[in-house]
Image: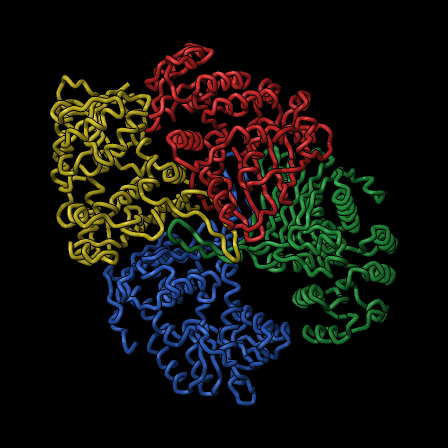
Chain colours: A yellow, B red, C green, D blue
């Protein structure tokens, strides 16, 4: 039984709280939030105790692990404090939009030697994992083309867009991580093409809402990612790995299974209304993997510190390509590359 | 907030306990079970208190509703005691294998005027409900053919089979209820054909494990139900309503969404491993409907006392047809018919 | 190159004519029809010659094979004349509605020793054949349940219905044949339940347009067939064989592959508009199998004389069950059984 | 009845011959081929006459239309000769790999005022047309992302690759045309990324066998095309148009409809073995549209001379991007742009 403290009682914090309460291997102890009332309400709901942020890092708290689900700008600081306190860390992505800042926090984690994982929850999607296993088992042979699609049902509020780091760092990054994970390979070149087709305000903010990213992998494989901030038909996510011996696909998912046959049409239930409905189960599975890791299970496939940083570097390079219109080599991506 | 007591801490009791704990409108107070240790363990897990069976019906318990998930032979007695105590009742099906005994218990419920529902959880399957809504909205026109399939992954232990009342009363009954609910109609004639193809011991016990049931409805519509106790490919449930204007179907469901393209085949993830994985969500939704009813929401579509009895009468008639090889009129089914 | 004469230049004759003209192993020589002008037009279109019915059976015609696609009441006579002429015979089903008459014609075929096949074209459906092969290869294990669905888009004209022999002999019979072929087994008992739900005139004519047929096979397997004369969504045919090791299905087919994602729905192209669009390819494949048989290829899986008679006997038994409401043993079906 | 001459009796010529023979509005008169024996055999098979190439352009031939299916390097010349002879022209793509040469031949067609179409047969795929109609009808709203996939089952022989003009001009070009047609829009920028992953010899020949093409349309919409010369699972073609109001998709197609349920898998029939099996029907439909146009039907949607040239210009630009690694503006694509 691992004792957990949760920092952040907003939407994602609430999701994590529910899973912490349900997990048989977790004792859900503390909840902290900049908004004390919010922390109290969430703690009460799940039989945990509210605490100040300082208190969760205190030895007296006696927690084994911190789940950081607060605002992005606080992550790096909390990661360093948890590392110093010798606590295991589950941090929502990213550690910091600034890769250098993230790297410093990461260095603290490495120095402290505490367990760490980053919230790339899509790696825990059951169907994506099945694709990963098929690829790893050689079922598709040598990987040649990867196709990833992510289209969210509606654009976030413009205020969020402005601080989100841009579509590459906010939305595409999940798929940049999936790409690395699915292929066990690294991209070496990226070209991005984008536009603000959904909301002109996004374009005025210097961002795009519709984009295509092409990547060349070290192995020679090619990858395509298309992202949109808005569909008229729910949340659309699809993963495909094509190789010399076959192709593995994690298909679009339907929220229900009704078909209506009328005239020359079959009208079927469509996609999940939102990204959350589609990926909800991945949050529990990500937590479960982390707990199993803490309990000493070997070979748990967890997104690492390095995974978090590498996805950011690729997203930075893609952003650079988007801005310059030119292909970008990833290891020198706009000068941010380094010791990866 | 409605205060609930749960009787029965076995497999289904445990499922109900989890949902009672999770439901925002429920205060999950008491757990009783013939096995006190089992009751204690389940209560502790969810922050409820263990209690004796007598205690849950005591005024002092101050519970609003009883969820009866104990052994079938205890249901009728507990229903009567809860009715007497003025408690709302959610009773797993059936009230009693003996329709007369069930009817007496039902009479007590009616006399007491307490809210009651029977655990026909399949009515709460999201896709089946979508079919029901399509039919009720006239999307398929006048109903002409209903096809229902239920094939479980493995035959229950022979000891269970012997006390189960037979395939009609144990497995098919859920679909007899679905039939009545989907069509808002009543069957008037039934013919059943069955065999023990899976396990000869089932045949020796006088039961079948593979069966076809044909029914004629009052409206003239025809219905087919096929049931098997064992598949080699997981749990297979399908509902289809065909009518003059179209057909609505709740399709077979897959447990995951991976496809592997190789050679001239596409290998996809198959069906849920078991019936429980397939219908798990229906238990919460059935409880939720009951709670909404208790809270005064109107027009909640709940399986009633009468629904429980009628499905039993049809199952009895089907059993009679199975035994005699003859079609059976349902209102005089083997002498069990009555005041329906 | 086998020389063929075609008798019958109506709808199905026209279909056969097109295939005879296209088949590389066929020399399409003669066309006869009660309506000489119709024969001439069809012959001209395909470079064949019109002929009188008498002429096609004349030695001078020098044809190797006769394809009989004329009115049903003429089949038995033409079969006997072709047999006498030593010609190979491809006869549309049935030989005659009267099994005794059909049997006499069959005896002439046997006596003459000429090659013969009956037009059970659904056996040549590519997907149905794939099911057959899977079953024969043991992929589904011991067969336990067979489900067959046939729903035509619109009821035939009442005048046709009156002379069609009834739904069992006209529509269901194709699936009675598929059942025997798919399982390599024989039904021993049948129960049919039907109604005239589509068109009251069909009921007044003593027939049904909507029916369920349940059959018990010699092996113990059970079979369900549902037939309707009218859908609101095109032609719906489905075949499924369920067994101890799995299930094989020939799915409903869509006429096109477009999907439209809008809101919470996916609107897909539906089923083929009519039975002919769905099964058109089977006519060529049936002819091709017959030609390969004539050319001496061994192990061609052709529907035989006996297959035609047996399907009729089962259809007769099903009709008897429909009329009496009682299950019927097939070997004594209403006194028509015999030396099968 | 339009009189046709066919030039070219190779694989595609044979396909056209079959359709010319079957089409009710066509009188299939002449077949010419550099290989006279081949022309004779094909003519004989379909009741046409063999002829020299010179003869088909002779007034004496009295043909209304020429179908040019000979080697690519002969197309431009034959187009000019047919134009001069006042014959309608159905020319397999491309007119010439050299856009200037193609343009000159096109000018001759325009000068002669003869009907002309180019063999972009994929426009006639029933499901692609359904997508086109949905887009044109506004069902997907404003187009934002187009995704096109073309993966052939096996790489062509290296000798063919060397004269094919490269993957962009040989394979991708069909989808560049589909893109223009589906969107009624023009690309203004292209970026291509490719590699020889299938066969190193293709790389040595300066070509790629696996590629991603990204295009920006005049309207702002973005398009992705992925092409591979070899799959391990048949021919894979998919078309999707995503817009502000929905998405329309022409799905991957299966060659048969059998499903086998075993264990936790469903094994289904896969894709068509080859591109030809997948698109065979489009050849007839393309011919049919051309004949309807010749017969005076208005608003027949035929690929035009200009369509052929524009697709080539885009393919040239994509090839240029592939070679330089840089995005290319299409109107000045490597200096080939012009009066489009």
Q: Is residue A153 left or right of residue C280?
A: left
Q: Position of residue C107 (x, y in %)?
A: 87, 52
Q: Eyeballing the image, is A99 above or below C154?
A: above
Is residue C147 visible to the viewer in this orientation of the structure?
Answer: no
Q: Quadrant of residue D217?
A: bottom left
Q: Quadrant of residue B240?
A: top right
Residue found 78% across the figure and 70% down from its top: C32
Residue found 85% across the figure and 61% down from its top: C77
Q: Nearer the viewer, residue D213 or B99?
A: B99
Q: Is residue A75 left or right of residue D91?
A: left
Is residue B241 visible to the viewer in this orientation of the structure?
Answer: yes
Q: Position of residue C100 (x, y in %)?
A: 86, 51
Q: Position of residue C255 (x, y in %)?
A: 53, 57
Q: Is residue D207 left or right of residue C85?
A: left
Q: Nearer the viewer, residue A88 or D136?
A: D136
Q: Quadrant of residue D192?
A: bottom left
Residue found 39% across the figure and 77% down from its top: D305
């Amino acid at each position: 039984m691992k004792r957990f403290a949760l920092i952040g009682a907003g939407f994602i914090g609430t999701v994590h709280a529910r899973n912490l309460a349900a997990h048989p291997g977790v004792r859900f102890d503390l909840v902290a939030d900049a908004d004390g009332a919010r922390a109290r309400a969430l703690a009460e709901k799940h039989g945990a105790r509210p605490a100040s942020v300082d208190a969760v890092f205190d030895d007296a708290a006696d927690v084994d692990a911190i789940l950081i689900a607060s605002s992005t700008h606080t992550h790096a600081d909390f990661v360093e404090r948890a590392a110093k306190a010798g606590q295991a860390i589950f941090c929502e992505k990213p550690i910091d939009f600034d890769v250098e800042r993230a790297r410093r926090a990461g260095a603290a984690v490495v120095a402290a030697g505490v367990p760490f994982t980053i919230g790339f929850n899509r790696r825990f999607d059951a169907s994506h994992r099945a694709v990963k296993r098929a690829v790893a088992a050689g079922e598709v042979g040598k990987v040649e083309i990867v196709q990833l699609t992510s289209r969210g049902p509606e654009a976030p509020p413009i205020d969020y867009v402005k601080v989100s780091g841009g579509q590459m760092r906010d939305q595409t990054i999940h798929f940049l991580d999936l790409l690395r994970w699915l292929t066990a390979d690294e991209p070496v070149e990226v070209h991005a093409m984008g536009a603000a087709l959904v909301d002109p305000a996004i374009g005025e903010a210097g961002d795009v809402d519709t984009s295509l990213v092409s990547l060349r992998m070290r192995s020679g494989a090619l990858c395509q990612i298309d992202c949109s901030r808005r569909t008229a038909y729910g949340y659309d996510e699809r993963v495909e790995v094509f190789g010399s011996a076959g192709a593995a696909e994690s298909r679009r998912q339907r929220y229900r299974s009704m078909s209506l046959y009328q005239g020359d049409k079959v009208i079927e239930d469509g996609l999940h209304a939102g990204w959350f409905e589609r990926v909800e189960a991945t949050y529990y599975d990500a937590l479960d993997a982390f707990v199993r890791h803490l309990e000493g299970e070997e070979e748990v496939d967890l997104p690492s510190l390095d995974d978090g940083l590498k996805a950011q570097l690729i997203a930075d390079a893609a952003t650079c390509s988007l801005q310059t219109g030119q292909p970008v080599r990833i290891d020198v991506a706009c000068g941010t590359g380094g010791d990866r």
